Image (spheres, helix red, strand yellow):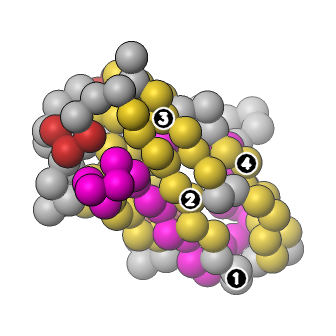
Amino acid sequence: QVQLVESGGGVVQAGGSLRLSCAASGRTFNSYAMGWFRQAPGKEREFVAGISANGGSTSYTDSVKGRFTVARDNAKNTAYLQMNSLKPEDTAVYYCAMGRGYGLYIAPASFGSWGQGTQVTVSS
């Protein structure tokens, strides 16, 4: 049974930074891609960033390119999302997810396990 536990959310002013962490257990972490999604009130869950199992490939949604960085430490079974230059429109619950395989995924259906989410609130 895979467990994903996010941490690092909080309240920050516009222009500030946060780093989200996602600790994984129950599966060989370095064999699976990871992804970050977010869901704002009244909106659908959207892809934010993804990283392949070996960390060699990454992908970002256009609205966060240049501001967010996805990374992973396979020795620590942890994925990260560094968020800089935060904007009020980044306010959402952020979820990490483990992919169904090794490659780089974007679609929610390509992820088989999800964390419980962590709230990020950016004030203007």
- In the rendered image, residue 117, in percent from the top left (x then y), is placed at 63, 38
Query: Residue 79 falls in which quadrant of the image?
Result: bottom left
Q: Is 32 on the left or on the right of 77, as rendered?
A: left
Q: Earlier in the sequence, mark 1 or mark 3?
A: 3
Does residue 59 appear in the picture of this structure? no
The amino acid type found where label 3 is placed reads: Leu
Region of the chain picked out in magenta, as a range:
73-96
Q: Looking at the rendering, in which quadrant would you find the C terminus? A: bottom right
Query: Residue 28 falls in which quadrant of the image?
Result: top left
- What's the distance in space between the residues labelled 1 and 3, CA to CA? 28 Å
Judging by the rendered image, the residue that carries numbered circle 4 is 119
Q: Earlier in the sequence, mark 1 or mark 4?
A: 1
Q: Earlier in the sequence, mark 4 or mark 3?
A: 3
Q: Earlier in the sequence, mark 3 or mark 2?
A: 3
- In the rendered image, residue 67, in percent from the top left (x then y), is placed at 49, 76
> Does residue 105 sit above or below 64 in this rendering?
above
- What's the distance in space between the residues labelled 4 and 3, CA to CA? 15 Å
- What's the distance in space between the residues labelled 1 and 4, CA to CA? 17 Å
The amino acid type found where label 4 is placed reads: Gln
Judging by the rendered image, the residue that carries numbered circle 3 is 4
Q: For mark 1, does the 10 Å Cα neighbourhood hold few (<14), some (14 to 19), or many (20 or more) residues?
A: some
Judging by the rendered image, the residue that carries numbered circle 2 is 20
Does residue 123 appear in the picture of this structure? yes
**Marks 1 and 3 close (CB-CB < 8 Å):** no
Q: For mark 2, does the 10 Å Cα neighbourhood hold few (<14), some (14 to 19), or many (20 or more) residues?
A: many
Q: Is residue 7 magenta?
A: no
